[in-house]
Amino acid sequence: MKTLFRSVFSIFVFSAVALLSFTACDDDEKYNFVFELQGSIVTEPGTTVTMPIVASNISSVSVSSYPAGWTVDKIDVATWTVTITAPKKYTAEDEKVEENGTLKLIGYTSAGTSVTATCYLSLLNKSIDLTDVPSNCYAIWQKDTRYTIDVTHRGEQMGEQFTAEKVDVMWQSSKDLIKYHSYDAARGEFTFFIGNEEVTDDDDNVIETRVPDGSAIIAAYDAADEVIWSWHVWVTGSDIESTAIATAAGTFMDRNLGAYANSDGATNTTKIHESYGYYYQWGRKDPFNRPYHYNMANNSNKSGYDSNGNTVRFKAATADNSDTGSEEFARKNPTTLILGAEDNGWDWLFDSHNSSLWSASQKSVNDPCPRGWRIPTSNQFAMLDIDAADDALPSAEVKDKWGWYLSDASGVKMFMLGAGRRSYETGVFTNVNNYESTPPVPWIGFYWTADTGEKDANAAKSMFFDLNTTRAVNNRYEPAREMYRANAMQIRCVRIQ
């Protein structure tokens, strides 16, 4: 792996310092107050660094706040520098220490106006460099860690490279999932920090911290501010390599692509919701968000946020012309679901049906699975079936699990969530059977394969199951059900052999 960090690097995430020139109510009073380098990262406890400040018309400075364990040793207005010393211990050795945080200074003009300047500070404890293993999707599972990814390649192809004008967070599932990010154009690298989220008991006492649940889309833009390529940062609850399930059909992930975990048959609604993966249109690499509620109540969709905390909602367009129904439009608009049209066979492409976007024979440039994994084939799902124990149980005993187990001939099994699909016509969540009407129960699973259709050349094959909530004898499992390509479905990645 490449060396990840220099001792200090520039970060441009804080809107408070994005403007280098501030103008007060009096148009004649102009001033600058900003850190020249917006971040200081040190790798050894107790390290002292000096940060330069760009300032004009600032007469005095005070310290507003800084992370616990750090010290602000000196502010020199003659040279406009601030000297900072990192904590002498990591958080693991002293729980009061904050390894990462923000230093905030307040500058005052002679007229009494105040303005703030902020700087990110980090005592680097854990870092992971992924620049040597480019991918469309990065599965991340370690909390309080800084990551660096390559942003010069499309997919895993190591040939043609591009240089982006800028790289930024286009969308993330929570405001603070991707923190303190920066883009180094010279090195073609994007660096970001993943923190932690607290787990509380019934009395709201914090009992542990864990890696956050969520995903983000990182996008590279050209000089015209159009997307060149985008990457999925998938923050999940554990190492997908160590939890994989080896079946006769291949070694599968134990969870859906984009899911935090696998509920593994639990009836706890929080675990069920965490088991939803993201939804993908056949041939596209970009994820579409899961439902807001575990039971798809009101068909509401989880929204997200950009790097400034502004709400970002997934959009929909219809492939009824060659502009919206194109690979170029899909690449430039990774948060737009492209609905099918009858005239194009309900594909998200308008003029033609590109059956090479995903491939059953090799991993394609548009494959959304992390490096070392790929979309499975229908033949692999054909080696699995509804687990006999689940199939024999009364529906009342299994339907609250929101899914069921598939197993191979030797009895190795894995739990699959009945997460339904997003409709090719409307984009809404569809996940009900109609065997009972009080109300219909969400119990349908659709999982894409890499195979194209045979009966319908415009379609593609999916693994499908349906729990009959009235008569178990009518349970269905189809490893190669043909579906329109504009549907957005779940994916269960399989390891490349």
Image (cartoon, grey):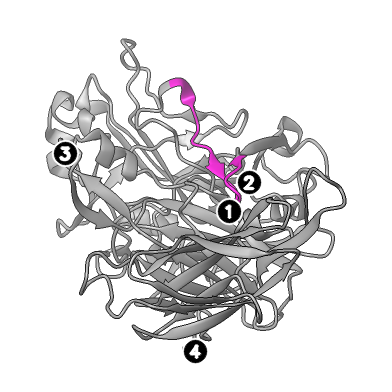
Q: Residue furthest front?
A: 110
Q: Secondary structure at mark 1?
A: loop
Q: Residue furthest right?
A: 28
**Structural distance between the alpha carbons of marks 2 and 3:** 37 Å
* 3 or 1: tag closer to the N-terminus: 1
Q: Nearer the viewer, residue 316 or 363?
A: 316
Residue at position x 21%, y 47% in the image: 264
**Structural distance between the alpha carbons of marks 2 and 1:** 8 Å
In the image, residue 312 above or below residue 362: above
- Observer-side mark, 3 or 4, equals 4
* 3 or 4: tag closer to the N-terminus: 4
Residue 286, numbered circle:
1
Residues shaded magenta: 298-311
Q: Are marks 3 and 4 in contact (CB under 8 Å)?
A: no
Residue 319, numbered circle:
none
| Amino acid type indicated by mark 3 | Asp
Mark 3, residue position:
390
In the image, residue 474 above or below residue 108: above
**Rendering coords of residue 353 (x, y %):** 71, 50
Mark 4, residue position:
3
Q: Nearer the viewer, residue 217 or 437?
A: 217
